[in-house]
Image (cartoon, rainbow, N blue to C red):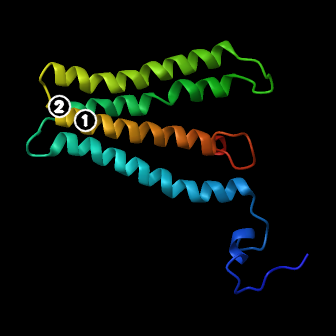
């Protein structure tokens, strides 16, 4: 098979620096990592804006950081315990998804409870909810990109 000339723009898309073929998953992961980190930064920016803007100046919404940390834990534990060769649904995996859903719903509910109790303003609540949406979409994107059991997987880390 003829390789493209070294000056070709497609030369690095098909091979690594050593000339070995790069799989599609590795290329996807290489492109997704900067996007995921940017999404995380934007989500945290919305959370910090909801806390630190001079008209809001309340740091109660930072408690949602605990939900960001806790949300992937049940699913990660279930993936370690469950054999994925079975095509049917698994009770352990379903329980993990249920617990993860509860954590995510709680992360969206906490700022609303704070706003109803007048601990934070509704504008701060809107910024925190926007940040929640972006952060949880980023976490979901991480599991979609790195969660498959192929040669490039987050489980190797």
Q: Which residue is mark 1?
A: 126
Q: How many marks?
A: 2
For this orientation, the residue located farthest to the top is 91
Q: Is residue 76 above or below residue 38?
A: above
79 on left or right of 114: right
The answer to whether the residues at label 2 and label 1 have Cβ atoms under 8 Å apart is yes
Q: Which residue is mark 2?
A: 122
Q: Is residue 100 above or below residue 35?
A: above
| The disc label shown at residue 115, or none | none
Gap between marks 2 and 1 measured at Cα: 6 Å
Residue drawn at x 35%, y 45% as measured from the top left: 43
Secondary-structure class at tag 1: helix
Where residue 76 appears, as percent x and y from the top left, is 58, 29
Residue drawn at x 32%, y 39% as measured from the top left: 130
Q: Is residue 66 above or below residue 30?
A: above
Where residue 111 appears, as percent x and y from the top left, is 25, 27
């Amino acid at each position: 098979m003829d390789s493209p000339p070294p000056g070709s723009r497609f030369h690095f898309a098909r091979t690594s620096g050593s000339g070995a073929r790069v799989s599609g998953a590795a290329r996807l992961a290489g492109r997704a990592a900067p996007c995921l980190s940017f999404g995380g930064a934007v989500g945290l920016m919305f959370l910090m804006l909801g806390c630190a803007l001079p008209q809001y100046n309340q740091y109660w919404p930072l408690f949602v950081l605990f939900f960001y940390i806790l949300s992937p834990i049940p699913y990660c534990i279930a993936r370690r315990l469950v054999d994925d060769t079975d095509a049917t649904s698994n009770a352990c995996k379903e329980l993990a998804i249920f617990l993860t859903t509860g954590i995510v719903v709680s992360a969206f509910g906490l700022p609303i409870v704070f706003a109803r109790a007048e601990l934070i303003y509704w504008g701060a609540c809107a910024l925190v909810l926007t940040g929640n949406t972006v952060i949880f979409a980023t976490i979901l994107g991480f599991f979609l990109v790195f969660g498959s059991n192929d040669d490039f997987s987050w489980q190797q880390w």
